[in-house]
Image (cartoon, rainbow, N blue to C red):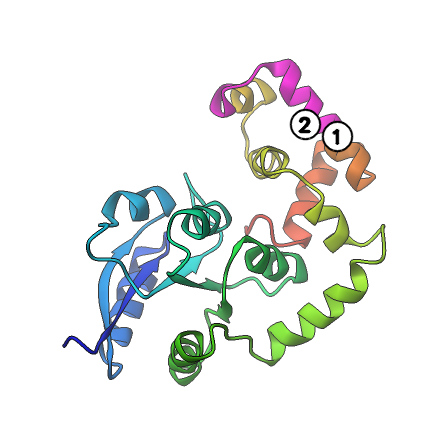
Amino acid sequence: MNNEKKIVVVDDHAMFRKGLCMLINMFANYTILFDAENGKDFIHKLKENDLPDIVLMDISMPEMDGYDTTVWLKNKHPEIKVIALSTMDADTAIIKMIKCGAKGYVLKDAEPDELKLAFNEVLSKGFFYNELVSRKILNSINLLVDEDSSVNKLLKLSERELTFLQLACSEKSYAQIAKEMFVSERTIDGYRDALFKKLNLNTRVGLVLYAIKNGIVVL
């Protein structure tokens, strides 16, 4: 039992999360420490005297998403390995998660053998990137020199601008978004105008389409 590595699954879909936990508990030398429905729930359940070895982190979650939670872990517990777990295979989503501190990226439709391989390699090598991710990373390195590429534009957005962009994809009014972000409506206007300029857009619909195309939100 002492040789078993502890895994935490963070995902807002309960049925998928519980099923994944059952699968991982069947892996030799791995056991589920706990599961959580979002970043805030994860931080609440995390115990300093009983930390996981690996966190399987969904990206798109309410209250606190995978990006913010991974950054929090990188700052507070850099020894914990984060593997992003998502349905999104967009270049921007993968690169942003790696930039936030993820050591690997596995799609939700991956075979169980690939997931176990990801665990093994993250612990032994410090990282796991399959062919899909490796190809996108190489592609994105080329895109980073292109000022007009979506990857370059996304990486230049601040965390607050990204939060506003995600909320702008909801049915909330700008006034409601301002209240949720604890800022003035004038500040929200500033976020909107900055995004319009950085992304070469001029409507809220354009912002929503950009966010969907680049894996920032999932329908």
Residue 170 covered by magenta stretch:
no
Seen at 60% across and 62% down, the residue is 94
Seen at 57% across and 60% down, the residue is 98
Instruction: Determine whether label 2 and label 1 are within 8 Å by CB.
Output: yes
Viewer-nearest residue: 1 or 159: 1
Q: Which quarter of the figure has residue 52? A: bottom left
Residue 188 covered by magenta stretch:
yes
Give the tally of numbered discs.
Answer: 2
Q: Is residue 128 above or below residue 33?
A: below
Q: CA distance from mark 2 to mark 1?
A: 5 Å
> On the rendered structure, is 66 left or right of 175?
left
Amino acid type of disc 2? Tyr
| Residue closest to the far left | 1
Amino acid type of disc 1? Ala
Q: Which quarter of the figure has residue 14? A: bottom left
**Residue 103, percent across and down?**
49, 66
Q: Main secondary structure of the magenta part?
A: helix
Circle number at residue 194: 1
**Residue 128, percent across and down?**
50, 75
Dot 1, how many residues are within 10 Å of its Cα: few (below 14), some (14-19), or many (20+)? Answer: some
Seen at 70% across and 32% down, the residue is 204
Dot 2, how many residues are within 10 Å of its Cα: few (below 14), some (14-19), or many (20+)? Answer: some
Circle number at residue 191: 2
Viewer-nearest residue: 141 or 196: 141
Viewer-nearest residue: 156 or 87: 156
**Residue 186, percent across and down?**
66, 14
Residue range corresponding to the magenta coloring: 179-193
Seen at 75% across and 30% down, the residue is 194
> On the rendered structure, is 195 left or right of 25?
right
Q: Which quarter of the figure has residue 113? A: bottom left
**Residue 5, percent across and down?**
26, 73
